[in-house]
Image (spheres, helix red, strand yellow):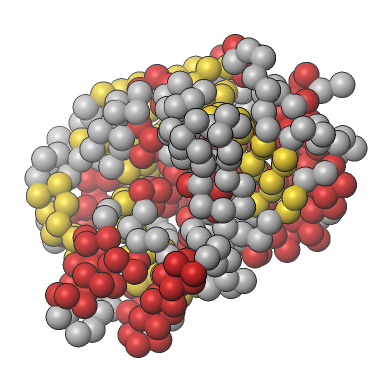
């Protein structure tokens, strides 16, 4: 019996010839990640362990992105803890404001994640890196502390669900629509502690930005990780960001799966997940008349340059509805600069939008777009739980950049085909 790509990576990192679902392994980690919300707790626990030094400072990445630029004194103190720890332990991969950005867009951009690697992050959306063919999963801060001290992590090998995507995509439909539709099919617990392996002809034609978006939201179906086998598109991306060597792995033809799901992408319309769960996905035309107060385009899910280009294409020559606040957040300074160079920033500002420095801010209701009681937002972020973006009585509708941009213009949730 063959192995899945997830099983192969975990076997290679635990010194085993082959591993099976349910087996416990001690895996060597290629990268350990923390941010300004999770790293300070991990640092505190690391010190309690009495380890003295990091197992390998070169494999530790710390990113200030959630409450930054510092929204208040508490956020400033969180970042200070990270900053001082990085200096003390020689963490060269510490990314501060102006030099970093949103972690899950930043690390691939910096060439810090690669095919075949085993990556642990104290953030649930660490599963993003499965888009390059890595095993990447999120953990709590105490697990990160132990990993920083030892360089290893104890893991249970997950079963895999194979999701096969076939067919050409309709206009404007992208990775965000595919993953929202998939979560709608599976449910928020439909892949609990399982690996979601995305494949098929549609994935083979999907650009890296869409692949990152899909793997980013694997956790929203309860998955341990999301992953795609590396191919020519992956290699082209990797060669554009790094010159280091990496090992690609793919699933065997006779690998065993807990479940196989087949999806005809030619039938998928632009998707919207209505409150208060990502699984509440439906075609934008079936959402009904939903007035909005705010539209957010950005985050680790959809803050890449391709997402901004799509939004700008919709917004060009148009104005944001007078009762809507449009907030556009490039995921990294490099993307921000590219948006300026391509004239996208001008389109956003002339339309009446606000262009923010890179931050996770509004995604988890911290700053730069917190919702008041009774307000509604359409957002390209990844979660729409109760109170996720602010007041417990506010509402968040998840969508891709095209829907978020069109909705900002019309003042209600809609797709770009409804624009005059």
Residue 59 occupies quadrant: bottom left
Compared with 398, 388 (above or below) is below
Residue 166 visible in rendering: no
On the rendered image, what quadrant is the C terminus found in? top right
Q: How many tags in the picture?
A: 0
On the rendered image, what quadrant is the N terminus found in? top left
Relative depth, front residue between 79 and 96: 79
Q: In this rendering, would 94 be left or right of 11? A: right
Compared with 338, 309 (above or below) is above
Residue drawn 19% across the image and 67% down it: 146
Looking at the picture, how far across and down is residue 340, in whole percent? 79, 59
Residue 399 occupies quadrant: top right
Residue drawn 34% across the image and 28% down it: 188
Looking at the picture, how far across and down is residue 117, in whole percent? 33, 59
Q: In this rendering, would 226 be left or right of 168? A: left
| Residue closest to the far right | 317
Relative depth, front residue between 338 and 169: 338
Relative depth, front residue between 23 and 318: 318
Compared with 306, 386 (above or below) is above
Residue 74 visible in rendering: yes
Q: In this rendering, would 294 be left or right of 339? A: left
Residue drawn 82% across the image and 44% down it: 352
Relative depth, front residue between 27 and 307: 307
Q: In this rendering, would 399 be left or right of 254? A: right
Looking at the picture, how far across and down is residue 281, in whole percent? 49, 21
Looking at the picture, how far across and down is residue 245, in whole percent? 42, 68
| Residue closest to the far front | 373
Residue drawn 65% across the image and 65% down it: 333
């Amino acid at each position: 019996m063959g192995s899945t790509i997830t099983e192969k990576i975990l076997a290679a990192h635990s010194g085993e010839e082959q591993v099976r679902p349910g087996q416990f392994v001690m895996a060597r980690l290629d990268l350990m990640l923390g941010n300004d919300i999770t790293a300070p707790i991990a640092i505190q626990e690391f010190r309690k362990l009495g380890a003295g030094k990091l197992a390998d400072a070169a494999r530790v990445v710390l990113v200030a992105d959630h409450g930054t630029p510092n929204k208040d004194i508490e956020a400033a103190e969180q970042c200070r803890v990270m900053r001082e720890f990085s200096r003390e332990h020689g963490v060269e991969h510490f990314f501060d404001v102006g030099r970093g950005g949103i972690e899950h867009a930043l690390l691939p951009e910096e060439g810090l994640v690669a095919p075949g690697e085993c990556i642990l992050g104290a953030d649930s959306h660490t599963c993003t890196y499965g888009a390059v063919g890595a095993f990447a999963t999120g953990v709590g801060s105490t697990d990160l502390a132990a990993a920083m001290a030892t360089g290893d992590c104890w893991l249970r090998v997950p079963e895999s669900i194979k999701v096969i995507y076939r067919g050409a995509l309709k206009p404007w439909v992208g990775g965000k629509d595919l993953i929202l539709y998939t979560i709608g099919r599976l449910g928020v617990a439909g892949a609990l502690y399982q690996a979601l392996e995305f494949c098929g002809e549609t994935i083979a034609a999907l650009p890296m930005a869409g692949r990152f978006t899909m793997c980013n939201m694997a956790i929203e179906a309860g998955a341990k990780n999301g992953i795609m086998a590396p191919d020519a598109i992956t290699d082209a991306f990797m060669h554009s960001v790094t010159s280091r060597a990496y090992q690609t792995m793919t699933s065997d033809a006779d690998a065993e799966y807990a479940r196989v799901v087949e999806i005809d992408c030619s039938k998928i319309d632009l998707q919207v997940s209505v409150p208060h769960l990502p699984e509440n996905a439906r075609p934008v035309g079936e959402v009904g008349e939903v007035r909005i107060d705010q539209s957010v385009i950005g985050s680790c899910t959809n803050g890449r340059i391709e997402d901004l280009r799509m939004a700008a294409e919709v917004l060009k020559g148009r104005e944001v509805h007078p009762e809507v606040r449009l907030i556009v957040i490039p995921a990294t300074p490099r993307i921000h600069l590219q948006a300026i160079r391509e004239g996208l920033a001008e389109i956003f500002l002339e339309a009446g939008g606000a262009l923010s420095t890179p931050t996770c801010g509004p995604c988890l209701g911290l700053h730069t777009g917190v919702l008041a009681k009774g307000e509604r937002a359409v957002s390209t972020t990844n979660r729409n739980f109760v109170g996720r973006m602010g007041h417990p009585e506010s509402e968040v509708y998840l969508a891709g950049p095209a829907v978020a941009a069109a909705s900002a213009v019309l003042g209600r949730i809609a797709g770009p085909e409804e624009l005059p």
